[in-house]
Amino acid sequence: MYLTPFFLGFTFFAGRYVSSSSSAEVMPEGIAINAEPQAPQVGSTGMLTAVFDPLDVTNQIVAWQSDAPEVLKINEDGSYEALSIGEATITATHENGVVGTLLMKVLPVEAERVQLNSDWEEGNSFTKGKTMTLTADVYPENTTDKSITWTSSDESVATVSEKGV
């Protein structure tokens, strides 16, 4: 029999009175980690979120840790900054010892555009034996690898050194 006397604030169940105002603490049985973005690029920031099983865990505070803080730095609130190319295992630990992990890969910032420049003055003719220096600007500015390999498509017409001369 199930009887609820509203005026007392108690529930009668299976021959016992149970306070309806008390609530048991719900502890996690598992933790999954969501990351936004999942695969960040060097220099980007994002947010980690702990998803609990069951979903109605009472205390949803976790301690965050990265096994490679030089790759992915995590703050107490779950925000993170991608510092260098590589992998980091992220750990979320609840006070009752339940742990969730996520492997994150930090990706390079790829070049989108290369602008070639030279020290040659416009209007001058370019003849045999003359030299010019080439430089390259790589965009976006935060491109991870800005190295340039200089080559000539026809070395009988023009040659170029590793330094763009």
Image (cartoon, rainbow, N blue to C red):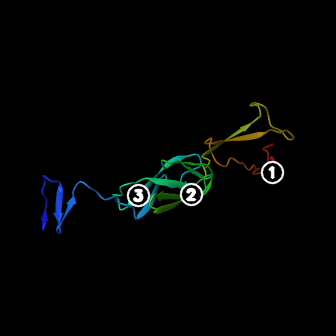
Residue at image x 47%, y 62%?
97
Q: Identify the mark at residue 155; answer none if there is no mark.
A: 1
> As rendered, which of 58 and 126 lies closer to the eye?
58
First in sequence, mark 1 or 3: give its number: 3
Q: Position of residue 6 (x, y in %)?
A: 13, 54
Work out whether 163 lies above or below 50: above
Depth check, front residue: 62 or 10: 10
Asked which secondary structure carries label 3, the reply is strand
Q: Mark 2 against mark 1, which lies toward the viewer?
A: 2
Which callout, 2 or 1, points at the residue further toward the start of the chain?
A: 2
Query: Residue 51: which numbered mark, if any?
Result: 3
Mark 2 secondary-structure assignment: strand
**Cα distance in 3D space between marks 2 and 3:** 20 Å
- Residue 121: image x %, image y %? 76, 31
Q: Distance between the residues labelled 2 and 1?
A: 41 Å
How far is disc 1 from disc 3 in space, using C-alphas?
61 Å
Dots 2, 1 in contact, CB < 8 A: no
**Dot in front, 2 or 3:** 3
Quadrant of the image containing the N terminus? bottom left
Task: Give the amino acid at mark 2.
Answer: Lys
Q: Nearer the viewer, residue 113 or 34?
A: 34
Q: Mark 2 points at which residue?
A: 105
- Tag 1 secondary structure: loop
Between residues 90 and 34, which one lies in front from this camera angle? 90
